[in-house]
Amino acid sequence: MSTGVSRRKLSLRIGAGIAALVLFAALFFFFILLIKVKGQFGYLYNFFVKTDGSLPVSTYETMEPVSHNVPYAVPSTKPERFLASTKLEVEGLIVTDYQRPAPIRLDESSVNLLSAHMGLLTFRGNYARTASSYQSVLDSATRLKKSWSFRTGRFLKDDGVNYWSGNGWTGQPIAVHWSNEWKAVMNLYPTACQKSDLTEIIYPGMDGKIHFLDIETGAETRPAINVGMIFKGTCSVHPTYPLLICGSGDSATGLFGEQICARIFIYSLIDGRKLYEFAANDPFSTRSWHGFDSSPIFAEEADTVIYPGENGVLYTLRLNTSFDKEHAILSIAPEQPVKYAYTSYAAGERFEASENGNGSGSESSPVVYDHYLFFGDNGGIFQCLDLNTMKPVWVQDLLEDINSSPVLEQDADGKWYIYVGTTLKFHYDTHHIGEAGIYKLNAQTGEIVWKKPYAVHTVLGLAGGVLASGASGCGEIADYLFYAISKVPSVESGYVVAISKTTGEEYWRYELPCDAWSSGCLVYTEDGHSRLVQCCGNGDVLLMDTLTGKVLSKVSYNSNIESTPAIVGNRIVVGLRSEYIVSMEIH
């Protein structure tokens, strides 16, 4: 009998031990969840539930164009339907009418940046945002191989406590193949200057510096510029002059704890001198937040910079550039910027009072053809602006925050279309789930042609949906459009999708185990085939077959990659949040 009692006691102890282990595991799991949701119980639901993911395409009726390739408003896109007010500042004064003295016009070669320099001179390579790589790769193109790495750093945030680190969104490096005559007038190190085929990486980062590297070796090509402000977005290089323009993405903490407002900088690439800065603490702005993540446009013939800001102001700045190449003397004499700002009914309803009512700004990079600028904002408003009169031509409401930069493309019939995505910021349910979408817009009228929606999560201030910009295919993938989508169908997963430009329907979909803010980049082989390079939030870099979505090769850096890579030939360069710039090769 005593043996039976002992066995029962032993069984009870084992059972109690198992129960204790189960309870400990449950408490540990719950504790991890609490850490993930930062103590906000309302988000626990999202970590257990998947959304419906990919949703049916919506198509819309559009009007037949009445004029060829000249933007105009139809009844559904008239600016007064969406804009509560507009205002314009010229030479420091508020005016109601304006005609630009030196008209802006960008022809096809200007939009495509067919210039004295070769390479990727702005975000997505040109001002239509359609060139996600430069030069072709070898025919095989089935394997990724790690190459070099370069250590960067971090920079104190404006709260004086936390840090920005490495390189962030959109953060594409600029890649420029300088000619020998250009290299001779620059402050390049001798080894870089003497290299006959130098392609220089120019990379502003969140360590407060602008780095200059050899794309082949990762060696520094010239001294870094220590700006002392952080850069998240992508800079632009002038197509003719050795000028660099970039905007800081956040304010900084000064030596005495003071706030130093974000602003826009113009640097000489002759000697690294700062030539000009502007847009800090601008009283003309419609929004208190100042940040400049957009990648600006140089209107070369008009000698004018076009730069949308997160402060709700669109800046156009005539530079009056002078360049004596023989004596390596570069100067600018900027006039006062011509500024455009507006308020919208949509933003007035969607933003809280802390955002200054119904003003909203732009984080995405604009596109342009001729003298028409197309850009979106954080309140969901997308518009076409006449750059020579600074008046809106048409306006469309895409309902959600527009972080994704638009892609502008002309089809075989000569019609212009825009592809752009949204993130979920406003219209979510009690479980923080709602729709983000990819849109096709008629560039002439602003009408929606189709919308491809996705059901996504938005949690802890991080929006699901489309932060990446589209990669538009050509050749064998001429009807393919590639996007990365975040927080779908789970909080901690995402999609890479290929959709039809014609219908918006998916050709294929690949599920990621993480977010993807980085924009996919297309590379083309010498025999006309293509591959997609996609960087991911878990540190993976994927080489994918564009026709099927099959992953051909993968390397991992175990670090969040928010930035979009620069790809020149078979070389890939991208920045990590873990304070490294890294390179890979495609074989």
Image (spheres, helix red, strand yellow):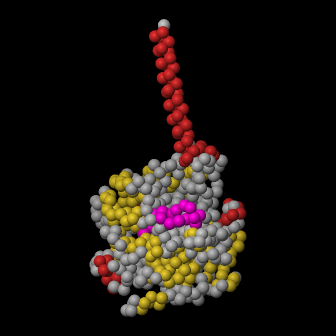
Q: Residue at x 50, y 87 (%)?
A: 332
Residue at the outermost top position: 1
118 up-or-down from 35: above or below: below
Counting from the top left corner in percent of width and height, residue 219 is at: 33, 71
Q: Residue at x 56, y 82 (%)?
A: 317
Secondary structure mostly taken by the magenta-highlighted segment of the chain: loop
Counting from the top left corner in percent of width and height, residue 397 is at: 63, 64
577 up-or-down from 227: above or below: above
Counting from the top left corner in percent of width and height, residue 320 is at: 52, 89
Horizontally, residue 579 falls left or right of residue 406, namely left
Considering depth in this image, is 236 or 402 the residue closer to the camera? 236
- Quadrant in the rendering for residue 153: bottom left
Magenta segment: 154-176
104 up-or-down from 31: above or below: below
Q: How many marks?
A: 0
Horizontally, residue 502 falls left or right of residue 183, namely right
| Magenta-colored stretch includes residue 166 | yes
Considering depth in this image, is 274 or 456 the residue closer to the camera? 274
Task: Confirm whether residue 70 shows in the render.
Answer: no
| Magenta-colored stretch includes residue 466 | no
Q: Residue at x 49, y 49 (%)?
A: 493
Task: Confirm whether residue 378 shows in the render.
Answer: yes
Q: Residue at x 53, y 43 (%)?
A: 32
Counting from the top left corner in percent of width and height, residue 556 is at: 38, 54
Considering depth in this image, is 330 or 295 the residue closer to the camera? 330
Which part of the image, by quadrant, shows the C terminus? bottom left
Considering depth in this image, is 179 or 576 the residue closer to the camera? 576
- Quadrant in the rendering for residue 498: bottom left
